[in-house]
Image: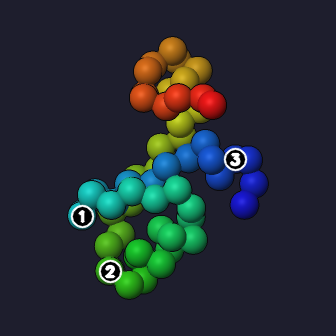
Amino acid sequence: MNREDLKVIWFCRECGTSFVFRSDVEDHEENEGHSKISKYDLSSYTDMGVDIGVERI
């Protein structure tokens, strides 16, 4: 894992499951057969000043 992994969240549009790691997305695609996965770059939302409910500790 690298720092960039923590800036992305993946979301399955077929079942609503969310993922943090690409390997989990790949496992989900293989095991569930779902292919409609969206990738969201969280850093692009924070750069725009959008509150996405993420709290820095």
Q: Which residue is mark 1?
A: 15
Q: Amino acid at mark 1?
A: Cys
Residue under the image location 41 percent in, 75 percent down: 28
Mark 1 or mark 3: name the one nearer the start of the chain: 3
| Quadrant of the rendering where the C terminus is positioned | top right
Residue 44 visible (yes or no): no
Percent coordinates x, y for residue 46 in the rendering: 55, 24
Specify the farthest residue to the front. Answer: 57
Q: Which mark is residue 2?
A: none
Judged from the image, the secondary structure of the residue bearing numbered disc 3 is helix
Percent coordinates x, y for residue 53 in the rendering: 42, 29
Q: Is residue 54 above or below residue 32?
A: above
Q: Is residue 26 above or below residue 1?
A: below
Q: Which residue is mark 2?
A: 32
| Quadrant of the rendering where the N terminus is positioned | bottom right
Judged from the image, the secondary structure of the residue bearing numbered disc 2 is helix
Percent coordinates x, y for residue 29 in the rendering: 40, 76
Q: CA distance from mark 1 to mark 3?
A: 25 Å
- Foreground of the two, 17 or 14: 17
Specify the farthest residue to the left. Answer: 15
Residue under the image location 42 percent in, 28 percent down: 52
Mark 2 or mark 3: name the one nearer the start of the chain: 3
Specify the farthest residue to the right. Answer: 2
Residue under the image location 33 percent in, 61 percent down: 17
Percent coordinates x, y for residue 3 in the rendering: 73, 47
- Looking at the image, what colour scheme do you see? rainbow
Q: Are marks 2 and 1 in contact (CB under 8 Å)?
A: yes
Mark 2 or mark 1: name the one nearer the start of the chain: 1
Q: Which residue is mark 3?
A: 4
Which picture quadrant has residue 21?
bottom right
Residue under the image location 56 percent in, 47 percent down: 8
